[in-house]
Amino acid sequence: RDIVVRCKALGVDDVSILATTTIGLSLFTAVLGAALIVIGKFKLASYCQLLPSSVVGGYLAYIGFFCGQAGLALMASVDVTGLSQWYKFLDPRALTLLAPGVVGGCFIYFMVRTFRHMAVLPSTIAMLMVAFYLTLWATGMS
């Protein structure tokens, strides 16, 4: 989000912002992959055990919260950067946009927990996509 705000402030067009962000994410992902390979080659992973489990747990919890909040913000088409802005999710339009994603996510969770088979997750996702587009077609929405 920060790179987009900075580029917009400098008057950069949307195509250049998209290209910059896409290339940046690709490069950073490649650097992370290389770092993980180096950690594996030099057998440095054992040093991760020295980190307190509460630190690792807190970090993972924050990442989960951040990803969940970002997913809700994308679905609701609102800009939410912290817990203090969650009131934006209560807007009627935001709730309408959130409902299919939240219901679909709960359905996927239920199906995966109920039926333990490797085909459940991809089948459920495909089923939800078909149901979504059939609903749009049947209601004449776009």
Image (cartoon, grey):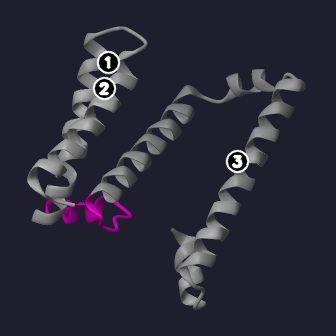
Residue positioned 85% across, 22% down in the render: 43
**Percent position of residue 54, x then y:** 51, 31
Q: Which residue is mark 2?
A: 124
Q: Nearer the viewer, residue 92 or 63?
A: 92
Is 89 covered by the magenta stretch? Answer: yes
Q: Residues within 10 Å of mark 3 (few under 14, many from 20)?
A: few
Q: Point out residue 27 in the picture as x, y percentages from the top left corner.
A: 75, 55
The circle drawn on residue 29 is 3
Q: Residue 13 occupies which quadrant of the picture?
A: bottom right
Q: Answer whether labels 1 and 2 touch (C-beta < 8 Å).
A: yes
Does 17 appear above or below 106?
Answer: below
Which residue is rendered at x = 36% and y = 50% of the image? 71
**Mark 3 residue type:** Thr
- Distance from label 3 to label 2 (Cα)? 29 Å
Chain part drawn in magenta = 76-91
Decide: is 13 above or below 55: below
- Name the N-terminal-most of marks 3 and 2: 3
Quarter of the image with the C terminus is bottom left
Q: Secondary structure beneath disc 3? A: helix
The amino acid type, in three-letter code, at marker 1 is Val
Considering every residue shown, the one lying at the far right of the view is 42
Residue mark closest to the camera, 3 vs 2? 2
Q: Nearer the viewer, residue 89 or 85?
A: 89
Q: Which residue has dot 1 on it?
A: 112
